[in-house]
Image (cartoon, grey):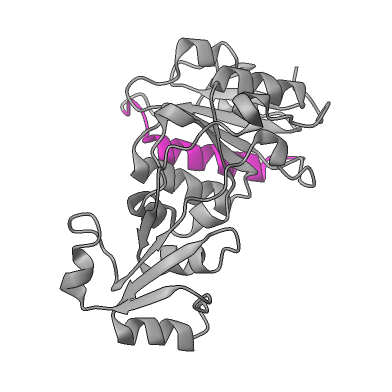
Amino acid sequence: MAKKGKERALRGRAGRMQGGRGSGRATKGAVRLWGKHAVTAALNNPDREVKRIWAVREVLEELVDAGEFEIPEGVRVEYADGPDLARLVSRDAPHQNIVIECDPLPELLLADLDDARPEAPIVVLDHVTDPHNVGAIMRSAAAFGAACIVTQDRHAPPESGVLAKSASGALETLPWIRVVNLSRALEEMAEAGYWRIGLDGDGEVTLGEALPTGPVAFVLGAEGDGLRYQVGQHCDQIARLPIEAAVESLNVSNAAAIALYACATRSQ
């Protein structure tokens, strides 16, 4: 039976370790981001500590003059040409003539979520490790008003330029919560009133049949392996997307986008 509201606040126990800290971050040390969307979003994020900017002078001046962002006080700016910037990023990365170096974002716990939007879905990723997929899912989650994405700290990509580029700015606006124990995090979501839907091609019902009217958490597994058994056991229902039999499955980022759209357009 679908639950119709939060029973209690999320407490974030699944994201705590000794000393009360978060789950530990997958990103160690400085992060380099590139591309106009990712850089602009980072420089406009008050929670992001930017240390250095490398850019083609004309590109940086154009962005600043257009009001896209202001250069924070104390940030070191170095001008370079395109080939020099290419040496700072992944091979063949589309840096668009601007690169920044920054600290990783602050750690978040489930308890940090804003309770003001109880209808906002949560996206839970089980061992989804491709940064392109995670970035694309972030972009869809931000577009459809998700509350956050939740991943297991040891089985998710770190913050990176590749992920930020795929997220097209969403890395800076969508809360990303890493937890130690995904199953325990799902238990906390259930205690808080979320109906947990695992997406799998072998689901007994379609997504439309499984959607509740209250808070929902979508749980998606890695391509190929799908949801792990123990994670599926912590879902209230396993649902499938109604795709043609000739197509075995969809990319996990496409599946997430469809689920989020269905949630956004459901009857309240």
Q: Main secondary structure of the magenta part?
A: helix
Quarter of the figure with residue 3: top right
Q: Position of residue 51 (x, y in %)?
A: 44, 65
Position in image of residue 186 (x %, y %): 63, 22
Left or right of 81: which side holds 248? right
Q: Tell me the quarter of the picture where residue 26 sits.
A: top left
In the image, the segment drawn in magenta is 247-268
Q: Nearer the viewer, residue 97 or 52?
A: 52
Which quarter shows the N terminus? Answer: top right
Residue 30: image x %, image y %? 39, 53
Please say if 136 is above or below 97.
above
- In front of the other: 31 or 171: 31
Using the rendered image of the protein, determine whether residue 255 is visible from the camera's viewpoint. Answer: yes
Q: Is residue 225 left or right of residue 45?
A: left
User: Residue at coordinates 46% horizontally, 44% vertically from top-left?
Assistant: 137
**Residue pictured at 47% horizontal, 31% vertical:** 153
Magenta includes 157? no
Residue 242 appears anywhere in the view: no
As for residue 248 lying within the magenta part, the answer is yes
Left or right position of 57 against 256: left
Report how many numbered discs are placed on residues in the image. 0
Question: Residue at left 47%, top 69%?
Answer: 40
Check the picture and name the quadrant holding the C terminus: top right
The x, y position of residue 248, in whole percent, is 33, 25
**From the viewer's perspective, is residue 250 above or below residue 264?**
above
